[in-house]
Image (cartoon, helix red, strand yellow):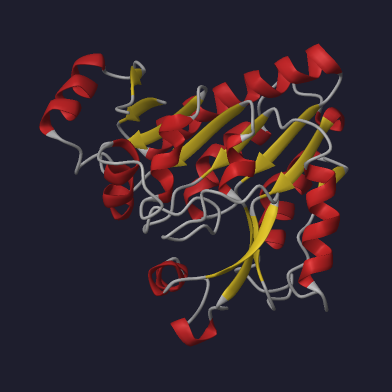
Amino acid sequence: MLLRVFSDRSSLGAAAAEQAAAAIRRAAAHHGKARVVAATAASQREFLVTLTSSPGIDWSTVEVFHLDEYIGLPITHPGSFRKMLLEQLVQRTGITHYHLLDGDAADPQQVIKRVGDQLASAPIDIAFLGVGENSHIAFNDPPADFGTQEPYIIVKLDEACRQQQVGEGWFADISQVPTLAISMSVRQILKAKEILAVVPEARKAQAVKSCVEGSISPMAPGSILRTHPNATVYVDWESASLLSPALRGALKSKAQETISGQS
């Protein structure tokens, strides 16, 4: 895993978008299409704004899957990840090949079977992730299931995860946040050829620390990214604030260069 640090969200988002755009162009050039997993949340805004305006991408070649969705939440709700996927990525680019997780369908198991089969039908070229305040990736809250090979699973959201959604302004209070969600599994995320995680802001500092340092554990789901051969985590100085002095010193001496994450 590689860790890259930037002074602010804007420069972080621009650098991450440059890497993502290059991966999409490369995949399209090599095999005629790019299969992408996209995170859509408050932390991804600057990144997605820059990516969707990047030159030289033929968006008609891009096929998009998203990471997760609440069960029981309509697409019209401001907190719906389907709504965000459409608004932040699909509508800005004209992508026509995308797969929505219908969280308010009568049978969520049918949804995860249908979209999961499509997801698993060919390799994913690049996955865009965030890391939650409790270190979740997708909606894999601690203790995350590191074993299942199912492409998508139904998960119960923990209180910290649900409170984050309130803090980000999507819900008025925690009673409004659904307790169940559809989530891409950890093992499925790791199957992507390349992973790019965008993790800005001071509220993510503890999550970044557990992702980069300490043991690789289901109690810190983001830590599993250290096992991937081509994962890059983008942070700013606020989200890197709890890293060890030695690692922060190394980051400062490297400026915006990449360094190896600790395994």
Instruction: Report the label total.
Output: 0
Seen from the viewer's position, the closer of residues 216 and 197 is 216
x then y, percent, for residue 257: 34, 15
Seen from the viewer's position, the closer of residues 7 and 40 is 40
**Residue visible at 27% across and 48% down?**
205
Task: Confirm whether residue 60 shows in the render.
Answer: yes
Q: Is residue 5 left or right of residue 221?
A: left
Q: Is residue 168 above or below residue 128?
A: below
In this view, the residue farthest toward the front is 147
In this view, the residue farthest toward the left is 245
Q: Is residue 238 above or below residue 74?
A: above
**Residue visible at 11% across and 32% down?**
245
Seen from the viewer's position, the closer of residues 53 and 75 is 75
Q: Is residue 262 above or below residue 159?
A: above
Q: Quadrant of residue 179?
A: bottom right
Placement of the N terminus among the 4 image quadrants: top left
In this view, the residue farthest toward the bottom is 175
Q: Is residue 91 left or right of residue 178?
A: right
x then y, percent, for residue 76: 73, 73
Q: Quadrant of residue 3?
A: top left
Task: Confirm whether residue 56 shows in the render.
Answer: no
x then y, percent, for residue 203: 30, 55
**Residue visible at 19% across and 27% down?**
247
Seen from the viewer's position, the closer of residues 227 and 76 is 227
In this view, the residue farthest toward the top is 30
Q: Is residue 119 above or below residue 168?
A: above
Placement of the C terminus among the 4 image quadrants: top left
x then y, percent, for residue 170: 52, 71
Q: Quadrant of residue 79?
A: bottom right
**Residue visible at 55% across and 54% down?**
41
